[in-house]
Image (cartoon, rainbow, N blue to C red):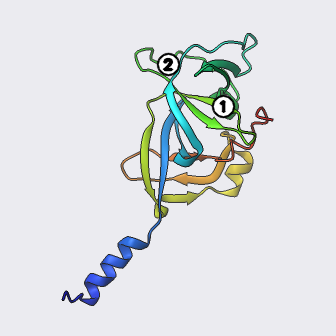
């Protein structure tokens, strides 16, 4: 029979109690963002998008035989069209999520996505003033601070509440 010392037991229970969040991290413009992995249906290479002649950040693409609304999250968050071309050697991707009414919505991202396992202790609450007056829209009140990565803003998992195009 194994006998656990109090110190060994405390280490074991301490390592088991912290919640780990699974997120997908990606870059938009020069900032890093994340979405909870359970909100994402699929991530595919960004194909041809069409139907946005006025540059509104809302367009369409075809995925598995159906039209998917593509919302340029970078445009919605930062309020401007991407003025400089991204490095064309780096592929772009489309994060597909389901809206509240079940329709698929695509969010183009500027970097290959990465799966992150983030401990609860890495989540930081953003200051209220920043949320009210900050330059980045559509984010939740949480930022992720990890020692080996730049800070990530957690996008609102309820389809970026400020986007009303999914109705």
Query: x and y percent of residue 124 in the render?
Result: 55, 59
| Residue displayed at 36% across by 78% down | 13
| Residue displayed at 74% across by 44% down | 161
Which is closer to the viewer, label 1 or label 2?
1
> Residue farthest to the left?
1
Question: From where the camera sits, is residue 82 visible?
Answer: no
Residue 42 relative to residue 77: left or right = left
Residue 60, picture quadrant: top right
Up/down of 148 relative to 41, above or below? below
Residue 62 is tagged as none
Query: x and y percent of residue 91 in the render?
Result: 44, 20
- Whichever of labels 1 and 2 marks the residue nearer the N terminus, that label is 2
Query: x and y percent of residue 64 in the render?
Result: 58, 22
Q: Where is mark 2, residue-wise? A: 86
Classify mark 2: residues with Cα within 10 Å, few (<14), some (14-19) or many (20+).
few
Nearer to the camera, 101 or 116: 101
Query: x and y percent of residue 32 in the render?
Result: 51, 39
Asked whether the beta carbons under mark 1 and mark 2 sit within 8 Å of each other, the answer is: no
Q: Number of callouts in the render?
A: 2
Classify mark 1: residues with Cα within 10 Å, few (<14), some (14-19) or many (20+).
many
Residue 4, picture quadrant: bottom left
What SS does tag 2 mark?
loop
Question: From where the camera sits, is residue 81 visible?
Answer: yes
For the C terminus, give its image quadrant. Answer: top right
For the N terminus, give its image quadrant. Answer: bottom left
Residue 76 relative to residue 14: left or right = right
| Residue displayed at 45% across by 35% down | 113
Q: Where is mark 1, residue-wise? A: 105
What SS does tag 1 mark?
strand
* C-alpha separation, residue under disc 1 versus residue under disc 2: 22 Å
> Residue farthest to the front?
65
């Amino acid at each position: 029979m194994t006998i656990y010392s109090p110190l060994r037991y405390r280490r074991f229970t301490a390592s088991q109690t912290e919640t780990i969040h699974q997120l997908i991290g990606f870059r938009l413009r020069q900032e890093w963002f994340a979405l909870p992995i359970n909100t994402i249906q699929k991530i595919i290479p960004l194909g041809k998008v069409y139907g946005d002649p006025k540059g509104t950040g809302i367009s369409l693409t075809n995925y598995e035989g159906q039209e998917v609304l593509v919302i340029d999250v970078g445009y919605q968050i930062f309020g401007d069209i991407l003025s400089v071309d991204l490095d064309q050697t780096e592929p772009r991707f489309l994060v597909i999520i389901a809206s509240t009414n079940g329709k698929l919505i695509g969010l183009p991202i500027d970097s290959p996505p990465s799966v992150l396992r983030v401990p609860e202790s890495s989540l930081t609450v953003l200051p209220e003033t920043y949320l009210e007056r900050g330059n980045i829209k559509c984010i939740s009140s949480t930022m992720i601070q990890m020692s080996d990565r730049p800070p990530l803003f957690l996008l609102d998992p309820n389809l970026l509440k400020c986007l009303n195009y999914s109705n």
